[in-house]
Image (cartoon, rainbow, N blue to C red):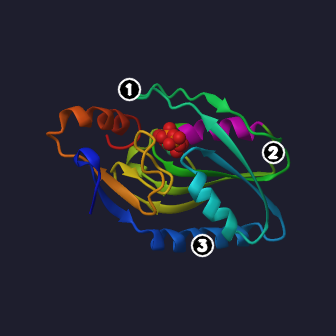
Amino acid sequence: MARTGRKIKLKPLIRHTVIKKRVQAVARQITRDFRGQRVHLIGVLKGSCIFLADLVREIDLETSIDFIAVSSYARGKESSGQVRLLKDLDSSIAGLNVILVEDILDTGLTLNYLLRVLSQRKPKTLRVAALLDKPSRRIKKIRTDYVGFRIPNEFVVGYGLDYAERYRNLKDVCILQMPPDEASAARPLRQAIRSRGVS
Ligand code: PRP
């Protein structure tokens, strides 16, 4: 188990070798589903960037990519369910086979908002690829088309996922653990956990 500063521990949950195989399998499925067509991947910033980069290189079709960014809803407070667009797409998605790419599906509030916004723009198809799915925290029902891994209700970092912008570069998806007596250090973690992690 890796140790970081301030006694934060990182316990590997999904190793990068396992992630790689699963991403390849998801890409094969997408390639089969859209044979002969182009797919347009939309990454939800920032967490999806590494998953998207690996996924798109395994898809054996014509592809294009774009990115979108949304506000974090009610960070550190009870969730209001409000999501706001921070960065819109660069181009139209009308008539395209769109795959919305997420690192993690948690409460579903983000995807619920994005699916509503993007479906109004008349894509030919609109699907969701999420590397991680944490169904125990769901508030909004979301239909996922491609899921990498279903995970338990733990706060995870790595492979794009962060804690206070750290750990996105870890190759493995890891559970972030902090001893309960680390009161001062734990405060930001508890905030992050309330907004994206553990009930
Ligand atoms: C995370 C993740 C999803 C969202 C999922 O983003 O990347 O976009 O939360 O949570 P939900 O299902 O409860 O809505 P975050 O706000 O942590 O930003 P980041 O991608 O920049 O890390």
Task: Name the image quarter holding the C terminus.
Answer: top left
Instruction: Identify the residue position indicated by label 1 in the image.
Output: 78
Give the left or right position of residue 68, taking residue 132 as reference: right
**From this viewpoint, which residue is outermost toward the left?**
181
Q: Are marks 1 and 3 in contact (CB under 8 Å)?
A: no
Disc 3 element: helix
Q: Is residue 61 above or below residue 129?
A: below
Q: Residue at x 44, y 58 (%)?
A: 170
The magenta span reads: 110-120
* Mark 1 vs mark 2, CA separation in Å: 33 Å
Q: Residue at x 82, y 61 (%)?
A: 38
Disc 1 element: loop
Is 41 in the magenta? no
The dot on residue 135 is: none
Give the left or right position of residue 127, taking residue 135 as reference: right
Q: Residues within 10 Å of mark 2 (few under 14, many from 20)?
A: many
Q: Amino acid at mark 3?
A: Gln
Sequence-wise, which precedes: disc 1 or disc 2? 1
Q: Magenta segment, principal secondary structure?
A: helix
Position of residue 94 measured from the top left corner of the image (x, y, whole percent)? 84, 44
Position of residue 192 measured from the top left corner of the image (x, y, whole percent)? 37, 37
Q: Amino acid at mark 1?
A: Glu
Give the left or right position of residue 47, taking residue 197 as reference: right
Give the left or right position of residue 184, taking residue 31 as reference: left
Instruction: Identify the residue position indicated by label 3 in the image.
Output: 24
Q: Residue at x 60, y 27 (%)?
A: 84
Position of residue 50 measured from the top left corner of the image (x, y, whole percent)? 57, 56
Instruction: Identify the residue position indicated by label 2 in the image.
Output: 93
Is 118 in the magenta? yes
Q: Amino acid at mark 2?
A: Ile
